Structure formats: structure tokens, C-alpha cells
Image (cartoon, coloured by chain):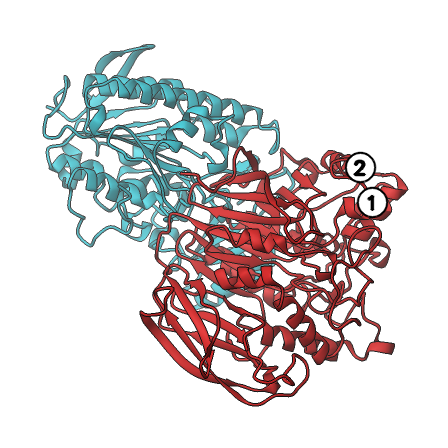
Chain colours: A red, B cyan
Amino acid sequence: MFQHGIASGDPLPTAVVLWTRVSPTKEATPGSGRGPRTTVRWTVATDARMRSVVSSGTTTTTAALDHTVKVDVRGLRPATTYHYRFSVGKVTSAVGTTRTAPAPTARPARLRFGVVSCANYEAGFFSAYRHLAGHRLDAVLHLGDYLYEYATGTYAMGQANAVVRKNDPPHEIVTLSDYRRRHALYKRDPDLQALHRRVPFICTWDDHESANDAFSTGAENHDPATQGSWSARRRAAYRAYDEWMPVRLSGTAKVGDGSQIYRRFTFGRLAELSMLDLRTYRNAPGGTFTQVPNRDAASRSIAGPEQLGWLEKGLATTESQWKLVGNPVMIAPVRVPPLPNRIRDAIEDTEGLLPAEGVAYNTDQWDGYTAERRRVLEFLADHNVTDTVFLTGDIHSGWACDLPTNAGLYPLSTTVATELVCTSVTSNNLKDILGVPPRTLSTLVETAIFGANRHVRYLDFDSHGYSILDVTPARIQMDWYAISDRARKDATSQWVQSWEVPASSQRVRQAQRPSEGAA
Amino acid sequence: MSGQEVSRVTRRTLLKGAAAGGAVVLSGVAGAPWAQGASVSDRRVYVLVIDGCRPDEITPESTPNLHRLRTAGRWFPNARAMPIAETLPNHVMMMTGVRPDRGGVPANSVYDRATGAVREVGESTDITFPTILERLRERKLTTGTVLSKDYLFSVFGTRATYRWEPFPLLPVTDHALDQFTMSALRAMIMRADPHMVFANFGDIDRFGHSDLTGPNVQVLRRTALASTDAHIGQFVTWLSTRPRWSSTTVMVLADHSMDWSQPDRFISLTKAFAGNPVLSGAFAIADNGGADVLTYIGPAARRDAAIAEARRVAAGVPGVLSTRTTAELRLGAKAGDLVVFCKSGYRFSDPQVFSNPIPGNHGHPATEAIPFFLTGGAVRPAVLSDRAATLDVAPSVGAIFGLPAPRGGYDGVSRV
């Protein structure tokens, strides 16, 4: 009945979204549009044995919802761990654990978040999720590319494009049924199920939840001639996301009543988290340098004026110390110096960076929308917004960067924020595309990027894994963990490196040990 | 203490105390004890203002002593100066615990309707609310001021039991170097041992303003940071050897931070208003570096229209960040009608385009983040996300000495 697992998400001080999908009959397969109306009971308790029940109720789901269930449980206590489960008749789900956010005026001494992005099913096993589930966490921040849209064998593992495990459906997903089936495939993954069961997620989407390099009126990986209108495809993608993810779109857990995913979470006076949507409102394609002749044009928008104003207002008025920004694509400027052609091509393939005779930019990131980036960084400077940390995914590599208002003058320029970027869960990184062992050719690229971008302080082009963000009033620390082999189900996990941002410094610096176990 | 009592206090009784580095001239209330003062309380509080220090300037490398003290102390990394982020209003807010609409000092510089001229708000009579300096004295506790800038000495006048008049003043910066300020502070403690001393160290601010090595290199500024850091480190180490260390609190904070502009990045509202039939000659402008304080001086009937037009025109001037009414900012009538803030990297230069040539400025929101921490034998280490403010100094000092809130209450809160 509950073969797609259970999940929770979007924790507020007194509410959390619970999610599951039921399979009431054999015909009620994901994306089939078949199966009976089903009544599902949900229960929330303060103990894992579900004896101290604090809230419960029933809801119904149908084929119109692809038999997914989303409940926004209210009336809970702040900063409290709860247990929950679903049942249909006498069949019960596993018991999950979730946690509410601290009260708005609370002063939590510590928060811990898992930080992940870019999980490509065909490129490997999600061991990163399994190992992350072993950590004590308040929530997992998923920064996008939760799933990939490609057909089997078109974007898999490494240089040989080896399919570690096959997609469903096997073709590129375009219709609502396709997107539902792909979500269902991912939700069957045992490692992802374990993590969802263990901790609430706070998610935003990047491009692959719809199609590669998406923007408001199209995508690099969308052909209207053969795949229909972009608006219809995106509508299908967002609908399936709304059904299958424990999120509130447009402020509610009700499916189909809106698609605004940018939203804000407050964790007492310690931190506030603004989750961005950098695909829906981007008014021009990112893509490669050649596609973007004028990346500095004031008319190019990655966030849209409404979202940008919302972000700025939140940053300027919050009472919370740390301003975390869930940022699907990198905001730090990245300039790539001349590189050998083989490496250059690999970077282009993997990271979307395009060296152009010594000057290169990933124009699918904020680098392709420099006017808006400048607006954000100047806003931080003008309003003296301190302790802002951008948390980023997308680029399949680990980074720690200072964000100066004038990168050309760094380190003498004023630094107004920092950026911490997690690696991919499985999606190809530079060494995978080059087909070389770790810490060989990619270290040359890292060194070259350090040389051309002095505000980039840490860079790891080789690892797959997850990060942990440990937040205290004194500092924020990101720990990067790498898995041993994404092609193995039993991959191990190892700490790689940690960087911290001391409070009120607006600068990253290396930390000597991972945060867990810290005083 | 009433105004009459203040006026009876001898401004400079010229009592000399020997101190390391030479003779330091201190003055005091007539009759105040000079050798190991009153024993009403064993508690001691020293409020040290590092004028103009940015919180991101406190690092293990550049200011190791401040960094060490902050790490071991009660630290508020989210702390802010209050608008207008200038020296006089924030020092007065520290000592009163109330906003300028109650405290009387909204800016460094305002237009004075009585005299018809722009003036510094640095007269003792400008403060309209009891300061903690006087309120402690009413409880038979002794207080001291050691303030490196002449206008700070003037504005607090004779409110403290013991005072040091800054000397010698540097001709360009018009302040006493930190080494002299620190000598005076030590001399005051050794000679009179006040229960609470309010000290200002001006080097970092003054050398930040005038550093012509540019906004990025800041040779003078960085040198001043290292020097002030050493002075404060040595001072706290010295305090820790004194008998009352276990009941001592040292509050370290800044009154505002600092921002730098390129020579050509200035804003002249006088110029922007010129030729506009509604605005020309209708406003007196008091330049406060990062904030212009505007007072309407035209016919009363046209006031509302002129203010609306001034906001419209100012908003269109490159470099202007925002326009706020003085009521919104709780600045009081002395501040006139409007405050125009600049963006980071700009400065105001009014009334003439050459009136303000200095690169370092503050007063605008870009300069509101400040360092703020407590250290000392009476302080338990903690790091707190609360948005502490300069306003919180008086309530904190009051709490340490068990002083009740003043009539009408504080606008700040205790951070101890």
C-alpha cells in the first residue's frame, strides 16, 4: 500500500506537511490515472510507538491526485520532534519522524541541516541520502535537481554514460503521466525513502524537475516541434511536483492551487531561510556563453522583480541573525582562465562553463544575469545586511566562496555575504566526464580557478555526497562528505573538508574538523 | 540630578593625577572623593566605544586582542547602531537608553531654527533625558567620562562625577590619540576608581575618515586598528589584575561602522534642488556624511507639497538609497523633517560639492552593523543572536547596578 514511502516537509513552528502515496489496487500505478478513491488516516504522536497521539484525521485521495496524500498538520508545538504514520484500513505505513521549527522568538543554540542536490537515478545509487539519514538533523535542504528528466542512457554515469539503474519511464518525461512515473521511481529508492522517513525536507526545484536549463518560456532540453508547448510541459512538471513532494506551493499543501515555490522559513532568532525559484521567472535562457551575447543586460532577469523584492524585504527586515538563502544556482562570479581543450570541453559538458579564449562564465548561473546579481549584492551592502549565506546546488561540485561587491578588487573589496555549494548526490562531476581518477586533472582546473577567482576559497570537482550545515550564533559551518562509489549500493561515506563563516565576518575560512561532536 | 545641580558643578577643577606617560588632567564634581572612591558597590563597569569600528574588522589576524575578548565574552554578532549612525546620537543613546525623540540628539549636525544656521548637536543642553551618568550619581555611585573627541566631551558636559577633557587634540582629526585616551582612562581608575566609566577611542574612526590611501588599501585605518586593539588588550589585562576583577564588566562596542566612497561618488541635494521652484531655498540641509538632514524653512502653507517634492527629487538622485521622515526614525523635532540616506559607496556633500571631500563616511544604513560584546570577570561567555543596539548600554549598566528604569522606561533593553 505504501510502497512509495512517507515523507514530511516545510516545517513551521506549529505545522508540518506529511506526505505519502497509496497503491489501493494493482491498477493504481503512478501516472496510470486509474484506481479507486481511497480514504487515508494520518496520525501524529510524540512517541515512536504512536501511543501519545496529538493529532489525527482522515483524508481522501483519488487517481486525479495520482493517489498521493498531503496533509498540513497544524496545532503542533514548536521545536518538537514528532512521529507520524498513515493507514488505509488495517494497513499502516512505517512510522516517520519529523520536527517543527522553533518559535519565531526562540533562541535555539544550534540548528543542523542536511544539504543536497543533483540526484541522477541512472548515474548511481543514492548512498549519500542513506548516510545523511544517520546524522542528527533538523531538516534537509534540497536545492534542486531532485530528479532528472532524461531518457534512459542519455545522461547516466561517467564518460561511458553507463546506466547504473534504468529510468522509468524509459523515455524523456514530457507529460503529466511521465513526470508522475519518474517521481514514483525516485520515491521507490530505499535510501531516499530512509531519509524522507527520518527528517523533514525543505525543497526547491532547479531545472531538471522540468527540463534542462529551463527558463520562463522554454528550456534547452525542450523542442516545441516534437514535445508540444513548453507551458504545458512545465505545468505537468509542476503539477507532479506538487503531488509528489512534501512542499507547500503558493503557501498551501493543497494540490493544484498554485505553483509559487519561493517561500521563507524562520528558525527563531537564529536563522531565516529564503528558498528561491530561479527557473520560473527567468526571462531569458542561460545556457552557454555563445547563447548569451549580453549577459550583463539590465533586462536579463533570473529571479524576477517580484521574487527579488520579496527576497530583499526579507533580508532587510528579519529579526533572525543568519540569513540563509536556498539558491539553486551559484551566485559567486566564476571566471575560467584558458585551459586545454579536453578539459575545457569537459567543464562545458559538466558544469555549463564555457571558456571563451580565457574568459568564461557559467551563464546559466547568476553569472548570466549580472545586473540582478549586482542588485542583490549592493542591496546587502546598502542595508548592511550581515551574516547572509547562499546555499547552493546545481554545479556537481563543492565550493566555499566569499561574495565581494567588487570581485576584481578582492580581497581588498568589501565582502557582503558568502556562498557554500554542495556536491551532487550522483550526477557527473568533472572527473567523471574526463574519465580520470580523483585528484588528478581536476586539481589543475581547481588551481586555475583559484588563480582567477581569489574569492573562491574551496573547490572540489571530484566528490559525490552530501553536506551538513551546522548553525550556531557564533558561526555557520558546512561539512562536506563524500561517498566512496556511486555505482555501489553499499558505498561508504567519508568526511572531506569543512569551512565555516564566523558571525559578522562575511568570510569563509577552513575549519579543522566536522561539526558533529563539536561543543 | 537636576539641571541646576549640573550647572553648579565646577566644569574643570583641574585636579591632576599622575599617570603612566605623563600628567593627565582630570576634573571632577566639587567634593568628589579622589582616592579609591565610594564603597557603595564593588561592581565596576567600563563602557569602551571603539569609534567607527566595523564588526568584520575584528579578526584573529588584525585585532587579536579584541577577537580573544569577544570569543571569551558575551557577544552579540547581530548588533546595530541606531539611526542616524553618527557619533553624537549613538553615544547619547548609549548613555540615555532612549531614542532621539526623547534623548534630544538626533544627528551630529542639524539646522537650528532659533539661530537659522546648521550647527553641531554638541552642547550639554542638547541632551534632554537623564543619562546613566547622572542617574548612578543619584544613587551615590561615581561615574567617569574619558572621551577622545571634543564634541563628545562637550555634549556630556559635567554629567559624570569625573571627566577628562581630551588633550592634546590632533589638528586635522580634532581628537586625542588613543594612547592619550587610554592613559587618561587608567589615571582616572587609579585616582578615583569610578563605579562606571564611559570611554571613547577615536583613532579608528578618525583615521578611517581621512585615510587617503583609498577605500581598499586603508593603511592608516589598519594601523589604527592594530594600535587600538593593543591598547584595549593591555587595558583589560591590567584590569584583570585589579582587586575587583570578579565584579567587573567591560562593554565593548562601536557607535557606528564606516563606509568609503570614491572621490566622484558624492551627492549634493543642494544642487539637485536648485532650479526647482518648489524646492529652491525651501530646505536647510545639514550634512551628516551618509545622511542629509533636511529642515523645511519655507512658508507653512507649502510645507506638505515641498516635502513630497523633496522626496520625489531625492529619490531620483544617483546614489540616494531612501528618504525617511524624522517621525519614522523617531528623531524628534530637532532633526527637521526628512532624512535622506545614501547607498554604500557614496557620501553627501552639502551645501557645496566640495563641502565633504573625505572618503570615509557613516550615518547611512550601510554603517549600522557594529561590534558589541561584554567581557570581564563578571561576564559569562555566550554568543547571542539578539539584535542588540547602542540603546542597550544604559539599560545594561542600570541592570548591573540595580537601577530602576527611568520615567517612561528605556527604549533599549538590558543585555546582561
* Residue with the mark numbered 1: A434
Residue at 49% x, 41% y: name it: A515
Q: Is residue A143 above or below residue B173?
A: below
Q: Secondary structure at mark 1?
A: helix
Image disc number at residue B281: none
Query: Toward the viewer: A162 or A271?
Result: A162
Q: Quadrant of residue B395?
A: top left
> Quick check: can you spot residue B348?
no
Q: Chain of mark 2?
A: A
Q: Secondary structure at mark 2?
A: helix
Same-chain check, marks 2 and 1: yes
Image disc number at residue A441: 2
Q: Quadrant of the N terminus of chain B?
A: top left
Residue at 48% x, 71% y: name it: A17
The answer to whether the residues at label 2 and label 1 have Cβ atoms under 8 Å apart is yes
Mark 1 neighbour density, 10 Å: few (under 14) some (14–19) many (20 or more): many
Q: Quadrant of the C terminus of chain B?
A: top left
Query: Toward the viewer: B162 or A157?
Result: A157
Distance from label 2 to label 1 (Cα)?
A: 8 Å
Where residue B94 sits in the image (x, y, percent)?
31, 41
In the image, taking residue A74 as reference, residue A235 lies left or right, namely right
Where residue A400 sits in the image (x, y, percent)?
62, 42
Q: Amino acid at mark 2?
A: Leu
Where residue A423 sits in the image (x, y, percent)?
66, 49
Mark 2 neighbour density, 10 Å: few (under 14) some (14–19) many (20 or more): some
In the image, taking residue B49 as reference, residue B11 lies left or right, namely left
